[in-house]
């Protein structure tokens, strides 16, 4: 499977905002975008006027990188968003938020989405009591996401919860720390999506 393997911090600098790809490091002074808030590369500090297409492309790339989604997956999610009733851009963000790896991250059981994807692939979580090791699995309202019994004694999760324990949980999720269980209350509302993306530009890009 194709996957970006270069430095994650370059992606944040390219999009000129924090995408929180490095977990705890993104909240410290070590964050690269705080040190070098310009596009990476030899000509990164030069000012360039972007075309309409360039602006639309940047918004799509930003959303893809924020959620760690490949091009083909992203196009599939857009097709799903078009078929749903409502605003296409909001539907797209709701679908991205519904990915299992994102839900695990939102619940505070991982410090980044990349770490969350790895934990899901290693089958540490269940959905409605069934083992699921597919990061792109889409949860629905009413689904229960839980840490598997065998994984609850792993020191890794205890350390993660100490780091993420102060995170504000989005209103569409609830989390029982004692039982390491989260419940999906509803689909994510637009105000629950913290990525600074103009989704209408993504819709315009795919509508051409």
Image: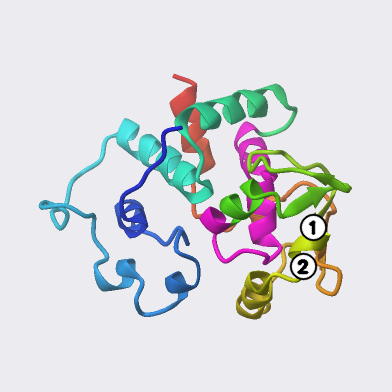
For the record, the magenta segment spans: 88-115
| Residue 34, x across and y down, in percent | 32, 72
| For residue 61, above or below residue 14 | above
Q: Tell me what residue is drawn at x 53 percent, y 41 percent.
A: 199
Q: Which disc number belongs to residue 50?
A: none
The chief SS type of the magenta part is: helix
* Residue 136 highlighted magenta (yes or no): no
Q: Tell me what residue is drawn at x 71 percent, y 55 percent.
A: 124
Q: Which residue is mark 1?
A: 148
Q: Tell me what residue is drawn at x 60 percent, y 36 percent.
A: 89
Label 1 environment density (alpha carbons within 10 Å; few <14, some 14–19, many ≥20)? some
| For residue 10, above or below residue 168 | above
**Quadrant of res 176:** bottom right
Q: Which residue is mark 2?
A: 152
Q: CB atoms at circles 2 and 1 under 8 Å apart?
A: yes
Q: Secondary structure at mark 2?
A: loop
* Residue 102 highlighted magenta (yes or no): yes
Image quarter hosting the C terminus: top left
| Residue 177, x across and y down, in percent | 81, 73
Q: Tell me what residue is drawn at x 15 percent, y 58 percent.
A: 45
């Amino acid at each position: 499977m194709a996957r970006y393997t270069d430095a994650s911090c370059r992606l944040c600098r390219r999009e000129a905002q924090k995408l929180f790809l490095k977990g705890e490091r993104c909240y410290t002074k070590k964050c690269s975008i705080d040190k070098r808030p310009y596009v990476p590369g030899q000509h990164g500090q030069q000012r360039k006027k972007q075309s309409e297409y360039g602006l639309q492309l940047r918004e799509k790339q930003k959303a893809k990188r924020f959620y760690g989604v490949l091009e083909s997956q992203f196009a599939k999610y857009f097709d799903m968003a078009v078929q749903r009733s409502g605003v296409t851009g909001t539907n797209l963000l709701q679908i991205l938020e519904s990915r299992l790896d994102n839900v695990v991250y939102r619940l505070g059981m991982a410090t980044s989405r990349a770490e969350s994807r790895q934990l899901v692939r290693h089958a540490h979580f269940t959905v409605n009591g069934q083992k699921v090791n597919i990061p792109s699995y889409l949860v629905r309202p009413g689904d229960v996401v839980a840490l598997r019994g065998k994984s609850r004694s792993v020191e890794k999760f205890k350390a993660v919860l100490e780091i993420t324990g102060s995170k504000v949980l989005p209103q569409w999720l609830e989390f029982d720390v004692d039982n390491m269980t989260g419940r999906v209350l509803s689909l994510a509302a637009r105000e629950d999506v913290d990525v600074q993306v103009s989704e209408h530009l993504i819709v315009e890009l795919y509508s051409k």
